[in-house]
Image (tube, rainbow, N blue to C red):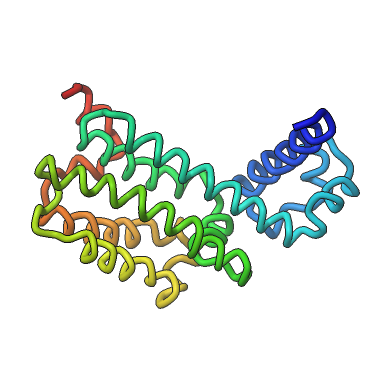
């Protein structure tokens, strides 16, 4: 990558970071290109040169965030920490996202309206995430935390069923902050279904450090 390409990549990432910060705090609709340009310290013209429109910028920010979350999941699952600690961390991060990101941004990821973005999230990102999560669940089977009799195919189908909730019940995911508890209950159904019993309630405790303060 030459100097020009590095500079262009740096500017693009700075715009994405600024946009993500504003979308997370105040939502997509209330965020203007002017606010983004001020935050990123670039001109509005520069933003349009890189992303063509606000819709194009929204699309790229969602891709950017989805890719980052996938990378975080890969890092967590391969960290070598105790299995239940990693599982609890995954649930903790999921719950944390409800408070960290504006509902409009969460909806743009979980149930995007943009056909191209929907294809990307439901295709590229989802399939990569499912592959990473499946490896993690296979590890859980070997360690005795996930039901050993479950095949990879049955886990995939079971996961697909929960994935389609966002399409079948969009009203649940349109306001994730208000429906936080309901979504958490659905997540419990999914996780305990894989584990085979309603065990380890500490997995859903936000005070994760109190329950997982040891190694091994």
Residue extending furthest toward the front: 1
Give the quadrant of the N terminus.
Answer: top right
Residue drawn 81% across the image and 49% down it: 50
Using the image, determine if residue 167 lies above or below residue 105: below
Q: Is residue 210 above or below residue 151?
A: above
Where in the figure is residue 211, as x and y percent of width and height? Answer: 20, 31
Q: Is residue 199 above or below residue 52?
A: above
63 over 100 or under it: above or below: below
Judge by depth and name the residue closer to the eye, 95 or 61. 61
Q: Residue at x 18, y 56 (%)?
A: 194
Q: Farthest bottom residue?
A: 168
Quarter holding residue 14: top right
Quadrant housing residue 11: top right
Image point 61% across, 72% down: which residue? 115
Q: Nearer the viewer, residue 211 or 157?
A: 157
The reply, left or right, for residue 6 in relation to residue 77 is: right
Q: Residue at the location (27% across, 29% down)?
A: 80
- Residue lying at the far top in this picture: please name it: 214
Q: Is residue 216 left or right of residue 62?
A: left
Q: How many marks on residues?
A: 0
Q: Nearer the viewer, residue 171 or 40?
A: 40
Estimate the x, y position of residue 177 in percent, counting from the top left: 46, 56
């Amino acid at each position: 990558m030459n100097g020009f390409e590095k500079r262009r990549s740096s500017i693009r990432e700075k715009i994405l970071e600024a946009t993500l910060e504003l979308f997370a705090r105040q939502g997509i609709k209330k965020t203007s290109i002017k606010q983004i340009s001020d935050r990123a310290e670039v001109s509005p013209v520069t933003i349009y040169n890189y992303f063509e429109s606000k819709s194009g910028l929204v699309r790229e920010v969602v891709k950017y965030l989805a890719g980052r979350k996938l990378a975080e999941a890969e890092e967590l699952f391969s960290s070598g920490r105790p299995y239940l600690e990693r599982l609890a961390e995954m649930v903790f991060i999921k719950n944390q996202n409800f408070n960290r990101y504006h509902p409009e941004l969460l909806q743009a990821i979980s149930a995007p309206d943009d056909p191209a973005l929907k294809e990307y999230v439901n295709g590229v990102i989802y399939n990569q995430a499912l592959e990473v999560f499946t490896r993690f669940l296979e590890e859980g089977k070997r360690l005795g935390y996930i039901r050993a009799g479950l095949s990879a195919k049955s886990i995939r189908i079971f996961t697909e069923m929960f994935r389609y909730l966002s399409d079948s019940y969009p009203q649940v995911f349109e306001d994730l902050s208000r429906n936080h508890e309901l979504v958490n209950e659905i997540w419990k159904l999914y996780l305990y279904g894989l584990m085979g019993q309603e065990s380890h309630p500490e997995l859903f405790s936000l005070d994760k450090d109190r329950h997982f303060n040891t190694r091994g």
